[in-house]
């Protein structure tokens, strides 16, 4: 068997130039490939010697650090299954994940809040792990002899268990194989023109596929250097951009960067690529960013389960309001309710098949079966269409779909129209129960200038001028901000819930 362990993509870079820098930290410290290789090997050995065996889950709720990356690679190298947990999760959310995943080990930060004993399953060993690797894991690491050879695995062996960030319902654990990680890293490295001379400015969290698999893995497999920032902060990003060649972010990051007066083409002189994903990038931000920096942001689309499906091209037209073309190896179709392929341009469920897909939901065989069509296509839950040139656009989530008077209404279409108003910074459209129509359209709007919000009638007129009457909002609600999860996605279920207890802030649209 050839060793399909994802880590094998990094080993040649270590051999080629052990002194090559892999991490540059906030404080200017440089860490080499050899450092990462040696430390991840020691950690891997300590994990195995602590009694873990193939397939065991290793749960990790840690702030981002070079040592935390080494721990992630250690799990992969040891053939264990890495389970990153959102650092914002509190006891109840954490308890659910640990109970569901039954990890062999659980790593937590040194200053993490105390947990009731029943939160951690009896069979799970808990260790503390600080940003320098300090904590209760240290004695195990110090006891091992450092020589370690990466464990041989086949491509189907699970490398990670990632719980969907879940804007609705309970999180589900998606099993991601070594083969899926390797395929995605190789394909994106090539598609986005990565090389060992790249410097990736990394500000994303690492408990999510975007920061871990799309950003870190691609840079690692390309022998690139990472400028590690513990979290996104527009001022810190502005400082580091002149030394960076690639930046990856969620749309909120780009929106915040635009508020910096220092953002201009000179600041971005070394950057060759800005990538956005995880949520819809508004055409307005796309245009403003280009006007300020000369860069057209490359928008791409993926998910925890599907890793990455579409990307705008590196060379060629990067279109606002489109997530681009299916990446090599991905079979993508727009399907109707019976999984049948719809004609070009029609809106339907985005379904995909390919080597980057997850292998199934942890302990949920029925759910896994339900999410796949008979011929192996994954039903992403996203609605969209493909144009005659193969560009894909997302129009909303299937469960976001509003059905008003029997007509299908796609929130993203209305949001795009409202977002074009200069007085609007951003909008989010949801459905609300309506006696006559079943559901009606409600628009939440963040004004560009809080002192000068748009009148509800203006918003309504705007939509009336451009879209069919049944898409016109019945209410326009001005808000200061939209509820978002940690990946910047608007939590529409919260907006729906908030409708029930709003009164003062509601501006009734004159219909
Ligand atoms: P997650 O599993 O947290 O990565 O969320 C995946 C979901 O985020 C997808 O199913 C889409 O609904 C959404 N998403 C990801 N990328 C984009 C994008 N470029 N535009 C619009 N929605 C996106």
Image (cartoon, rainbow, N blue to C red):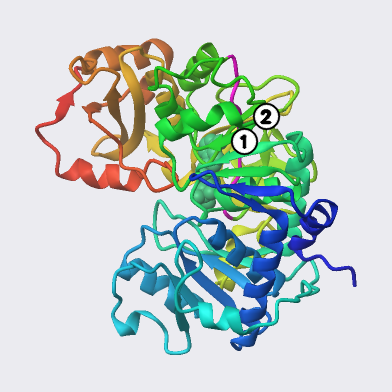
- Please identify the quarter of the rendering in which residue 414 is found: top left
The answer to whether residue 410 of the structure is visible from this angle is: no
The segment highlighted magenta reads: 294-304
Q: Secondary structure at mark 1?
A: strand
The label shown at residue 300 is 1
Q: For the C terminus, which image quadrant? A: top left
Image position, residue 14 (x, y; %): 78, 56
Picture layout, residue 91 above or below residue 262: below
Q: Is mark 2 within 8 Å of ligand 1?
A: no
Real-space CA distance between mark 2 and mark 1, rounded to the nearest whole angstrom: 6 Å
The residue most toward the left is 504
Q: Are marks 2 and 1 in contact (CB under 8 Å)?
A: yes
Determine whether, in the image, residue 510 is placed left or right of residue 307.
left
Q: Residue at left 55%, top 72%?
A: 364
Choose the circle earlier in sequence order: 2 or 1.
1
Q: Residue at left 60%, top 19%?
A: 295
Q: Nearer the viewer, residue 139 or 398?
A: 139
- Please identify the quarter of the rendering in which residue 389 is found: top right
Image position, residue 470 (x, y; %): 37, 24
Q: Secondary structure at mark 2?
A: loop
* Residue, disc 2: 312
The label shown at residue 100 is none
Q: Is mark 1 within 8 Å of ligand 1?
A: yes
The answer to whether residue 463 of the structure is visible from this angle is: yes
Main secondary structure type of the part rendered in magenta: loop
> Does the stretch in magenta take in 64?
no
Q: For the N terminus, which image quadrant? A: bottom right
The residue most toward the right is 1
Q: Residue at left 44%, top 74%?
A: 135
Image position, residue 206 (x, y; %): 52, 54
């Amino acid at each position: 068997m050839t060793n399909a362990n994802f880590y094998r993509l990094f080993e040649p870079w270590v051999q080629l130039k052990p002194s090559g820098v892999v991490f540059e930290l906030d404080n200017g410290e440089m860490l080499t490939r050899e450092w990462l290789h040696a430390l991840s090997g020691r950690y891997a050995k300590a994990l195995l010697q602590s009694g873990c065996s193939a397939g065991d889950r290793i749960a990790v709720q840690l702030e981002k650090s070079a040592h935390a990356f080494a721990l992630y690679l250690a799990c992969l190298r040891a053939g264990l299954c890495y389970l990153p947990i959102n650092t914002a999760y509190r006891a109840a959310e954490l308890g659910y994940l640990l109970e569901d995943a039954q990890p062999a080990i659980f790593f937590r930060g040194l200053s993490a809040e105390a947990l009731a004993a029943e939160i951690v399953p009896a069979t799970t060993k808990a260790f503390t792990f600080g940003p320098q690797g300090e904590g209760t894991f240290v004695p195990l690491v110090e006891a091992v002899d450092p020589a370690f050879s990466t464990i041989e695995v086949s491509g189907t062996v699970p490398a990670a268990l990632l719980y969907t960030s879940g804007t609705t319902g309970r999180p589900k654990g998606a099993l991601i194989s070594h083969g899926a990680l390797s395929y995605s890293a190789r394909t994106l490295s090539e598609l986005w023109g990565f090389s060992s001379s790249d410097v990736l400015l990394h500000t994303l969290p690492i408990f999510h596929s975007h920061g871990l698999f799309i950003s870190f893995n691609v840079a690692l497999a390309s022998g690139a250097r990472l400028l590690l920032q513990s979290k996104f902060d527009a001022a810190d990003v502005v400082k580091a951009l002149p030394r960076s060649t690639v930046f990856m972010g969620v749309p909120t990051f780009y929106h915040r960067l635009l508020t910096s007066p220092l953002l201009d083409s000179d600041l971005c002189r070394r950057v060759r690529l800005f990538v956005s994903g995880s949520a819809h990038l508004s055409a307005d931000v796309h245009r403003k960013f280009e006007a300020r920096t000369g860069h057209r942001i490359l928008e791409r689309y993926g998910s925890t389960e599907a890793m990455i499906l579409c990307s705008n091209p590196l060379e060629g037209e990067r279109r606002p309001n489109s997530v681009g073309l299916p990446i090599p190896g991905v079979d993508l179709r727009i399907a109707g309710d019976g999984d049948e392929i719809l004609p070009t341009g029609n809106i339907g469920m985005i379904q995909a098949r390919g080597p980057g897909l997850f292998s199934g939901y942890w302990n949920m065989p029925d759910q896994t079966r339900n999410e796949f069509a008979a011929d192996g296509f994954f039903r992403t839950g996203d609605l969209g269409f493909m144009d005659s040139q193969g560009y894909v656009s997302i129009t909303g989530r299937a469960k976001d779909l509003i059905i008003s008077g029997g007509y299908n209404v796609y929130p993203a279409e209305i949001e795009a129209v409202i977002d074009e108003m200069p007085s609007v910074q951003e909008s989010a459209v949801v459905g609300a129960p309506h006696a006559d129509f079943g559901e009606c359209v409600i628009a939440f709007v963040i004004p560009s200038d809080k002192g000068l919000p748009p009148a509800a009638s203006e918003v309504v007129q705007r939509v009336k001028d451009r879209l069919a009457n049944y898409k016109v909002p019945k209410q326009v609600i001005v808000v200061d901000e939209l509820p978002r999860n940690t990946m910047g996605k608007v939590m529409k279920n919260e907006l729906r819930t908030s409708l029930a207890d709003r009164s003062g802030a509601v501006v009734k649209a004159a219909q």
